[in-house]
C-alpha cells in the first residue's frame, strides 16, 4: 500500500468490481423471474399494499427503506423495466466497459445498481428478508468508489472492503459461539449438511463423512471466522513496515476465507452469500507492483473516497459495538441506507429436517381421494431426486418453505399460496418444478409434514433413494381452505 493509493491491489479491484456486478446480475434476474408472482400486483404479498400502508397516516413515522417506488407508483411493468436496467448495467460492469472511463462512470453505474436493488428489496418483505440482500447492497455501494482501470484503487476503499469481510466473518463466528451448544461441543455439522435450508448435490456425501471429520469442520470454521479475519488488516502495517510480509499475511487470511467458503459452496445452496464472501475476500490479495508517477489518484477522487471513509467511521460504530455485545444482533441494519450492517447466520442448527409437502387431488371426496404431490425446484420432495445446485441463484419460495415448520404459526403468504394452487394460477405454478395436474385446477389441496433424513449408503444401494422420510401430520387440511 502507498498512502492514498493501494497500488498492489489492482487485481483485487478487478475481481471485486466484476464479481460484485455478476452477483447483481444474478439478483436482478432472480427478481425478474420471481418478484411478480411473489410480491407483484397479484402476488402472494402484494407490494402495492405495503406501499399504500406506508403512505397512510397510520404508518406515519414508520419509514420503509429507500425505494424509487415511493416516488413512482409501483406496477409489475415498471418492476420489470427496473430489473432489465439492472441486468444491462451489471453486464457492462462484468465486461469491464465502464471501468475504462473516468472513475465517476463506474461510480454512477454501481450506485445505480445499489439504488435500483434497494428499491426492490425494500418492498420485498419476508421474501427479501435475508442477510445477503443487505450484504449485496453494502458491497455495491463500496464498489462504486474503487475507481477506474487507469488509476490504482483507493486505499481507504480497499480497507473498507476488509472491514466488510471482517464483520461478515467475525460476526458469523460470534453468533455461533454465543448460539447453540452444538457449535461449542463441535457437533453442529453432524446435523447441518442434512438439515440446511437447501441441500446441494454433494450435501449427502458431506453428511455421511465420519463424525471426527465433522468436528474438524467446526474447528476449521471457528478458526476461519474468529481468528483469521483479524489478519485481513495486516497490509496496513506496510505503511510503516516496508517489505512483503504484511501483505503476504493479509493474502493468506483472504485465501483461508476463500477456501472455507468454497467448501460451503460445494456442500450447500446459500444463494449468493458464499459467492459474495469469496469475491469480497479477494480484496485482501495484493499483487506487488512498483509504484510509478502514473499510479496516483486525482485530488477530487481522494476527496470523494476520503469522505466515504469518514462516513463509514461514523456509521460503523453501532456495528462494532454489536460484535462484542452480549445480545448480538444478526443480519441487522442500523441505518436506512443499509451501510455498515451486522451480519451472521446459523447461530443454532436444527437437529431434524421437517418438510411441508403440498398435495392436491382432483377427486371430490378428500377423505377417499388419491393425493399427488407438488414438486419444488430446490427443496426436498421426491425421495429419489438428487438435490440440484442453484446458488448463487436464489429460490425465494423454497427458502421460505424451509422456515415454515420452524414458526409457531403459518405465515399469511402460505394460505394465499395454497389458494393460488387451487386456482391453478400460472405465474405461481411457474415457481414450482412440477405441477402434477398439468395446469388443471385441483379440487382440493392440503399441506402435510414429513420428517426427512439422508439415506445411508446401504439404503441408497438397496432402494435407490437419496432421502428417507416418514409422515407426521396434516398441517392444513382440505376442509380448512376456503
Image (cartoon, rainbow, N blue to C red):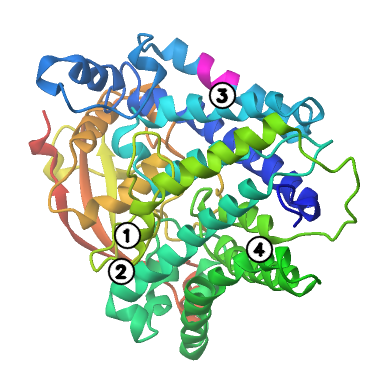
Looking at the image, is mark 1 or mark 2 earlier in the sequence?
1
Q: Secondary structure at mark 2?
A: loop
The residue positioned 40% from the left and 48% from the top of the image is 341
Could you give the CA–CA distance between mark 3 and mark 1, rounded to whole angstroms?
30 Å
Q: Which residues are magenta?
A: 81-85
Q: Are marks 2 and 4 in contact (CB under 8 Å)?
A: no
Sooner in the amino-acid sequence: mark 1 or mark 4: 4
Question: Separation of disc 4 and disc 3 at Cα?
Answer: 31 Å
Residue pointed to by mark 2? 348
**Quarter the N terminus occupies:** bottom right
Residue under the point 90% across and 43% down? 293
Is tag 2's residue or tag 4's residue first in the polypeptide sequence? 4
Viewer-side residue, 353 vs 300: 300
Q: Please name the residue that numbered disc 1 is placed on.
A: 322
- Viewer-side residue, 56 vs 303: 303
Observer-nearest residue: 338 or 471?
Answer: 338
Q: What residue is pinned by disc 3?
A: 112
3D distance between C-alphas at marks 2 and 4: 35 Å
Q: Which secondary structure, mark 1?
A: helix
Amino acid at each position: 500500500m502507498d498512502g492514498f493509493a493501494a497500488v498492489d491491489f489492482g487485481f483485487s479491484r478487478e475481481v471485486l468490481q466484476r464479481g460484485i456486478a455478476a452477483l447483481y446480475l444474478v439478483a436482478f434476474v432472480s427478481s425478474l423471474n420471481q418478484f411478480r408472482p411473489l410480491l407483484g400486483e397479484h402476488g402472494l404479498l402484494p407490494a402495492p399494499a405495503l406501499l399504500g400502508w406506508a403512505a397512510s397516516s397510520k404508518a406515519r413515522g414508520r419509514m420503509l427503506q429507500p425505494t424509487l417506488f415511493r416516488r413512482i407508483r409501483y406496477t409489475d411493468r415498471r418492476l420489470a423495466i427496473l430489473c432489465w436496467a439492472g441486468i444491462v448495467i451489471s453486464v457492462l460492469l462484468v465486461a469491464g466497459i465502464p471501468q475504462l472511463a473516468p472513475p465517476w462512470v463506474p461510480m454512477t453505474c454501481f450506485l445505480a445498481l445499489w439504488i435500483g436493488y434497494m428499491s426492490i428489496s425494500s418492498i420485498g418483505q419476508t421474501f427479501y428478508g435475508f442477510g445477503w440482500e443487505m450484504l449485496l447492497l453494502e458491497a455495491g455501494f463500496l464498489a462504486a468508489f474503487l475507481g477506474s482501470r487507469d488509476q490504482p484503487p483507493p486505499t481507504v476503499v480497499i480497507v473498507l472492503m476488509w472491514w466488510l469481510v471482517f464483520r461478515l466473518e467475525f460476526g458469523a463466528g460470534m453468533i455461533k459461539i454465543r448460539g447453540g451448544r452444538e457449535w461449542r461441543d463441535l457437533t453442529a455439522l453432524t446435523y447441518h449438511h442434512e438439515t440446511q435450508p437447501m441441500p446441494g448435490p454433494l450435501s449427502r456425501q458431506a453428511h455421511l463423512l465420519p463424525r471426527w471429520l465433522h468436528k474438524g469442520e467446526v474447528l476449521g470454521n471457528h478458526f476461519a471466522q474468529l481468528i483469521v479475519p483479524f489478519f485481513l488488516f495486516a497490509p496496513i502495517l506496510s505503511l510503516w513496515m516496508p517489505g512483503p510480509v504484511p501483505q503476504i499475511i493479509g493474502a493468506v487470511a483472504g485465501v483461508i476465507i476463500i477456501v472455507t467458503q468454497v467448501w460451503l459452496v460445494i456442500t450447500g445452496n446459500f444463494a449468493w452469500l458464499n459467492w459474495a464472501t469469496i469475491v469480497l475476500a479477494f480484496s485482501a490479495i495484493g499483487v506487488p507492483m512498483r509504484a510509478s508517477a502514473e499510479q496516483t489518484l486525482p485530488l477530487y477522487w481522494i476527496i470523494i473516497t476520503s469522505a466515504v471513509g469518514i462516513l463509514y467511521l461514523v456509521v460503523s460504530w453501532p456495528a462494532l459495538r454489536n460484535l462484542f455485545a452480549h445480545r448480538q444482533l444478526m443480519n441487522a441494519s442500523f441505518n436506512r441506507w443499509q451501510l455498515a450492517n451486522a451480519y451472521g447466520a446459523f447461530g443454532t442448527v436444527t437437529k431434524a429436517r421437517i418438510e411441508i409437502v403440498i398435495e392436491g387431488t382432483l377427486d371430490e371426496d378428500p377423505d377417499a381421494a388419491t393425493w399427488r404431490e407438488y414438486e419444488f425446484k430446490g427443496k426436498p420432495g421426491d425421495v429419489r431426486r438428487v438435490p440440484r445446485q442453484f446458488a448463487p441463484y436464489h429460490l425465494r419460495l423454497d427458502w421460505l418453505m424451509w422456515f415454515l415448520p420452524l414458526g409457531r404459526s403459518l405465515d399469511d403468504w402460505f394460505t394465499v399460496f395454497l389458494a393460488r394452487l387451487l386456482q391453478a394460477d400460472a405465474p405461481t405454478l411457474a415457481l414450482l418444478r412440477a405441477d402434477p395436474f398439468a395446469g388443471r385446477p385441483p379440487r382440493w389441496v392440503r399441506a402435510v409434514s414429513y420428517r426427512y433424513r439422508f439415506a445411508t449408503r446401504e439404503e441408497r444401494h438397496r432402494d435407490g433413494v437419496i432421502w428417507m422420510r416418514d409422515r407426521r401430520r396434516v398441517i392444513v387440511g382440505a376442509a380448512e381452505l376456503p
